[in-house]
Each structure stands twice: as structure tokens, then as C-alpha cells.
Image (cartoon, grey):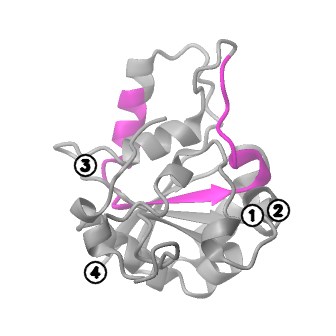
Amino acid sequence: MAYNVFISFRYKDGINYKNALGNMFDARFDTVDYSEDVDRSFMSDDTIQRYLYKKLQRSSVTIILLTPQAVNHRHNWIGDYDDWIYDEIRYSLEDRDNNRTNGLVAVYTPEAAEMLFHDSFAYCDIVKNVDNLFRKNMMNVKPAYKLNPEPELFDRDYDSYCSLISWNEFTSNIGKYIEIAVKKKDETYKYNLIKRL
């Protein structure tokens, strides 16, 4: 079955990764890739919403490319979120008539790894609390559906609505991670979704 995939990325340091990823998809996936390269300074919130609704309408999975410039969301001069990636994730998580909630996969590049992880051996302890909506949707499975029986340990694939996967792992088995995201998309009731910061 073919799935439509939306790639969310920071244009300045993510365009090469986005292009490489787009070239890796086969006939099972149709990539829909739009960057934040559009000037949003004169766009109202309603205009941005309509703009992104149209782009996300066909997609079922959103891939968030985490490059160093994409790890933390951007703010405007008064401190509100003013960031394409934030809005792309936020609207991907909405359940609307013309677009159900998307599955999420956060794919981090080698350059972004040190910004995401503490030095630790326990998976649940190493992910930093970055200012990004993907992070709020990790380790958010409801207790009744938790796969890992240990209270402080989480199954990377199924105990987080948004899986955090390295670039090398993801690109070596794209189909696996897309399929997992689609499965979770169809079982959103298992997760405590955070749809905005």
C-alpha cells in the first residue's frame, strides 16, 4: 500500500538531507516536501493554517528531519512560536475531516545527535528536553498499552507516538519506520498526544 509522506525540515541545513531522503523513496511512498523557505512574516495565523492544511491533506506520515537548526523551535520577538516546523508538526497532529492525525517520525542527522542526547547508557535517560513538539510526543503511551514492562524503560518504536531514529537507521530501513508510524496513526487512542506547546 502506498503512503503519502510529508517531510518537515529546516531549509538552510536540511535541504541536502531532504533531497537525499526523497531520492530513497520507492513506489510505495509519495513524498510531499515543503520547507520553511516561504516568507511567513506577512502571513496571518489563519493563512499559515490554510497553507499547511493544503500541503498536509494528502499525507499520512510526517517525517521531521532534525538538523542542528531544526532541533529547537524558533520564536518571534515576543516569544511566541514562529516556526514552520512547529506548525507542520502541530497541524500533522490535528484530526480534521480532510486529514486524519499523521504518524510522526523524527529522524536526527549525525550533526544534531549531541544536541539531543545526554551521555548515558539508559535510553530513557539520554533524550534531552529540547524545545520541540516532537519531544512532547515521546514516551507518551498510556500505561495500559506500554510494551516494555519496565516502568522507566520505553520501547523505542511503540511506546512513543513519535519515534526518534538516527539518519543511518532510518535510511537503512525506511519501510519499517513508515509502517510503524502508520500503525500508531491508526491507534492514536493508545497515546497521550500533545498537539501544541
Magenta-colored span: 49-76
> Which disc is residue 62 wearing?
none
Q: What separation in Å lies between label 4 and label 3 (alpha carbons)?
A: 18 Å
Residue 190 lies, in percent from the top left, at 26, 65
Residue in the foreground of this view, choosing between 121 and 95: 121
Residue at which label 3 appears: 99
Residue drawn 71% across the image and 63% down it: 17
Residue at the image point whose x is 62% and y is 87% from the top? 172
Using the image, determine if residue 8 lies above or below residue 2: above
Q: Can you tell which of label 4 and label 3 is closer to the viewer?
A: 3
- Determine the secondary structure under disc 3: loop
Q: Earlier in the sequence, mark 4 or mark 3?
A: 4
Could you tell me if the residues under marks 1 and 2 are in contact, i.e. CB atoms within 8 Å? Answer: yes
Q: Mark 3 and mark 2 in contact? Answer it, CB < 8 Å.
A: no
Of badges 2 and 4, nearer the viewer stands 2
Residue at image position (43%, 37%) is: 196
Task: Look at label 1 and name its amino acid.
Answer: Phe
Q: Give the residue type at disc 3.
A: Asn
Residue 19 can be seen, yes or no: no
Instruction: Choose the circle earlier in sequence order: 1 or 3.
Output: 3
Is residue 102 a member of the stretch shown in magenta? no
Q: Closer to the observer: label 1 or label 3? A: 1
Q: Secondary structure at mark 2?
A: helix
- Label disc, if present, on residue 114 of the rendered structure: 2
Q: Nearer the viewer, residue 150 or 6?
A: 150
Dot 4 corresponds to which residue? Answer: 1
Residue 62 percent location from the top left of the image:
45, 58
Q: Quadrant of residue 64?
A: bottom right
Q: Amino acid at mark 4?
A: Met
